[in-house]
Amino acid sequence: MTAAATSTPATAGDWTVVRRRGRRRGEAPHTASHPDAPPPLPVTPIPCFDSSPAARLQLALAALLRRDLLPTTAAAADLFDPVLSAAECAAAAALGFSVPRLDDGCRRRVEECTLFYMPHCEASLYDALLAANWESPAQLRRVCVLGNSFRRYVTQAKENRAGPAAKAAHVLAAERFAWEERVDEAGCVDEDDWFTRAFNETSWHFFEVEDDVDLATTMTAG
């Protein structure tokens, strides 16, 4: 589960403006390959793609996102997984990604609109990302996540209150005001269908939280 992050030199101050602009034009991002504006792109984490067909498909989408969303080769696009081999790091660099040496555990505070591509990451990693940007609604609106469905995590938390999803407090709180768009409706996963395995339960997440919302309070709300 490798992750990628891309910073967007967006003219808009946050993703809410970007997404609403697209919605007015009838262009909300119904597919994984076409959000409304270019961003910085952290890809965080894609597992060993040297040996996993599903991971190679996830990496291919990361490369397409980088190509289509970043206006210049100088724009930031990081790809990281703590278990990547030297050969995989070299391959990522050849595709235009920077490979950070420091494992920040996805605790990355953004300074501009940033798209985080995080296919099939653990709930704790999404939670760490949100926690790092939870200081204000304006800060959280700079974050866009393409990754596991937060709605699904809410369901999992209700079904197992001792499981990983139930411990992801920021994910559960954010789902209340997140705008989520599924990129697939595959249903049951065919074990022989690598494409479905790579992208099942994947969604866009935009955080449409108003300025007067006290995010600290949302963490304790039932």
Image (cartoon, grey):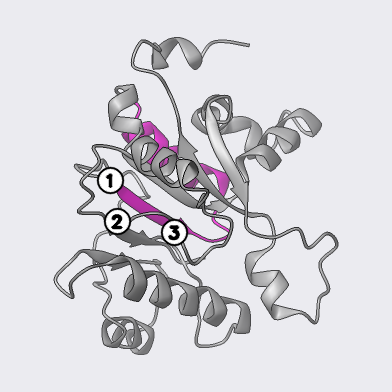
Task: Tell me which segment is drawn in magenta.
Answer: 113-134
Q: Is residue 21 above or below residue 82?
A: above
Q: Is residue 8 above or below residue 172?
A: below
Q: Is residue 92 above or below residue 76?
A: below
Label 2 sits on residue = 39
The amino acid type of the residue labelled 1 equals Cys
Residue 113: assigned label: 1
Which structural element holds mark 2?
A: loop
Q: Earlier in the sequence, mark 3 or mark 2?
A: 2
Tell whether 183 sits left or right of 186.
left
Mark 3 crowd level (few <14, some 14–19, many ≥20, 10 Å Cα) = many
Residue 117: assigned label: 3
Mark 1 crowd level (few <14, some 14–19, many ≥20, 10 Å Cα) = many
In magenta stretch: residue 118: yes
Q: Quadrant of residue 65?
A: bottom left
Are the residues at dot 1 and dot 2 in contact (C-beta closer than 8 Å)? yes
The amino acid type of the residue labelled 2 equals Pro
Query: x, y (%) of residue 47?
Result: 51, 72
Tell whether 42 sits left or right of 202.
left
**Disc 3 versus disc 1: distance between alpha carbons?**
13 Å
Q: Residue at x 28, y 31 (%)?
A: 139
Which mark is nearer the camera, 3 or 1? 1
Q: Quadrant of residue 107?
A: top left
**Disc 3 versus disc 2: distance between alpha carbons?**
11 Å
Q: Residue at x 29, y 27 (%)?
A: 138
Query: x, y (%) of residue 151?
Result: 67, 38
Q: Earlier in the sequence, mark 1 or mark 2?
A: 2
199 or 46, nearer to the observer = 199
Q: Residue at x 24, y 72 (%)?
A: 98
